[in-house]
Image (spheres, rainbow, N blue to C red):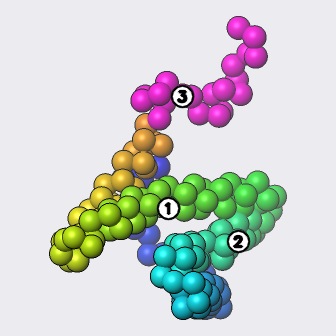
Amino acid sequence: MQIKLDTSALGDSKWYEYAIRFFFGGAVSVVAGLLAKKYGPAIGGLFLAFPAIFPATATLAEKHEREKKERIGLHGEKRGRDAAALEALGAALGSLGLLAFAAAVWLPLPRHSAWLVLVGAAVLWFATSCCLWLLRKYRHKVFGVRSHTNRARRPLYP
């Protein structure tokens, strides 16, 4: 899988799909703000870390892939589920990068310059996310793990 910028995908979504994502993101932010006001910023921050637009993005990715296959006369359920699963994998890897960012801000921020800590945490987030993506991509070389398609072809009892 190559990382690339494909702006043509922006035209695949309807205006109301962007509105749904905006609504989910705003609703989660409001809930996190209310929780922070009542229970303190540490609790509110935990809820602000929720991937606010992920539920909308995963369902829309599934819908778009399914519709794309159905337009050419094929069943698109499996392809739609696979697209949603890839969205989930990306969200999980991104969450681990955000965890590294949070740790890099939380520990040194009281003792060091805020801008320096945030820049360092952003670099750590980027490096962590890239390393996790590369590790996922080259896991067969690093760990000797084969993809699930290769494992399915191997006999169960060698």
* Residue drawn at point x = 70 percent, y = 66 percent: 62
Q: Residue 148: within the magenta? A: yes
143 lies above or below 21? above
Residue depicted at 66% across the width and 73% down the height = 55
Judge by depth and name the residue closer to the eye, 88 or 76.
88
Residue 95 locus on image (x, y percent): 50, 61
Q: Earlier in the sequence, mark 3 or mark 2?
A: 2
State the mark number for residue 95.
1
Q: With respect to residue 149, does 13 lie above or below?
A: below
User: Where 125 sits versus 15, above or below?
Assistant: above
Residue 43 magenta-drawn? no
Q: Position of residue 84 (x, y in %)?
A: 66, 61
Q: Residue at x 78, y 66 (%)?
A: 70
Task: Find the magenta span and give its range.
Answer: 139-158
Figure check: 47 above or below 1: below
Q: Give the residue type that dot 3 points to.
A: Val
Instruction: Give the secondary structure at mark 1.
Output: helix
Reading the image, the residue beneath label 3 is 145
- In the image: residue 128, left or right of residue 55: left
Please name whichever residue, 79 or 90, is drawn nearer the observer in this view of the structure. Answer: 90
Q: Quadrant of the C terminus?
A: top right
Label pair 3/2, CB-CB below 8 angstroms: no
Callout 1 crowding tier (Cα within 10 Å): few <14, some 14–19, many ≥20:
some
Q: Label for residue 59? A: 2
Sequence order check: which comes first, mark 1 or mark 3?
Answer: 1
**What is the spatial separation of the Cα atoms under label 3 and label 2, in whole angstroms?**
30 Å
